[in-house]
Amino acid sequence: MNNITVLIKELREKTGAGFLDCKKTLEENKHDIEKSIESLRKKGLAKASKKTDRIANEGAVGIYSNNDITVIIKVNSETDFAAKSDTFLNFLDTLGNLILKNNTYVDKNEFLSFKYEKGTVQDYFNSMIAKIGENLILNDLIVKENNKTNYAFYIHNSYRSNIGKIISFLEYSAKNVDNDIEVLSKNLCMHIAAMKPESLDIEDLDKSLVINEEKIQRELILNSGKPSNIVDKILQGKMKKFYSEVTLLNQSYILDQDKTVRNIVDDNSKVDFNLISFELISL
């Protein structure tokens, strides 16, 4: 498979556009994938591009917790076959439990320099690379404090009870955490895994993402021939739809499509139920 064929395949997967449209756009943009995506979107030939559309390697995500902290760790491998092996899963468990043992907040670069046995965590990675026969990369590492908020999590495509292909994690507050609130928080984690929001609410969105979306939607409206005096009104509606797709509180709740997640939160105001933050780590 030559290079242009590979690029066309990647562009079709990311945009849903046809073969000839992808080929022509790649040629026009000198084989630049990101410029081609934007060009197709301006022509109305591509789906909305999100961070979650980027190509991911194989591997797994694990979650580990004690009384003080919760750790979410993602390690990439080259193949799904390796990621499912006990050797790889035990490796991931060792990494997660090592952070719990140290009970510390650490980023992934700091963690690689941690002492482990006679060397460092990076040395441990190197030894596992040799053992498994694939490149292994520490891709994500999140450490959350437990004693100030409540939390729930959901594992999708699980390999073990604490490891899978997707982990969604939700921090929330509530005056009374009873069984109903625990079930609700778990369901919201399932919603996050399914709907993949970019942020909790509109003001939390990456400003450059919003600016770029407004630019693309304005161009699409102008190219459709709509009168210039109603462009702003149409744009307002387009952006409202965009926000309803990418922000958690404004998404339609998967278990009750007639309500948004914000409505569900408001329905539980008697117990002061509020969402604080979420994480979505996936492959």
Image: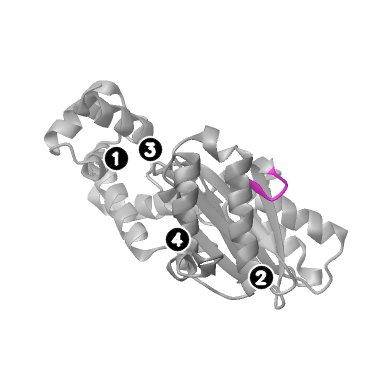
Q: Earlier in the sequence, mark 1 or mark 3?
A: 1
Q: Nearer the viewer, mark 4 or mark 3?
A: 4
Is the Cβ of the residue at disc 1 closer than 8 Å to that at disc 3? no
How far across and how far down the image is residue 175, in percent? 80, 74
Q: Nearer the viewer, mark 2 or mark 1?
A: 2
Q: Earlier in the sequence, mark 2 or mark 4?
A: 2
**Can you tell which mark lies on residue 41?**
1
Please give the name of the residue rendered at 66% of the width and 70% of the height, measured from the top-left corner: 101
Q: Earlier in the sequence, mark 1 or mark 4?
A: 1
Label 1 crowd bin: few (<14), some (14–19), many (20+), radius 10 Å: many
**Which stretch did the figure color magenta?**
160-164
Please give the name of the residue rendered at 66% of the width and 47% of the height, measured from the top-left corner: 155
Q: Nearer the viewer, mark 2 or mark 3?
A: 2
Q: Amino acid at mark 1?
A: Arg
Q: Amino acid at mark 4?
A: Gln
CA gap, disc 1 to disc 3? Answer: 7 Å
Q: Amino acid at mark 2?
A: Lys
CA gap, disc 4 to disc 3? Answer: 39 Å
Residue 104 drawn in magenta:
no
Q: Which residue is mark 4?
A: 122
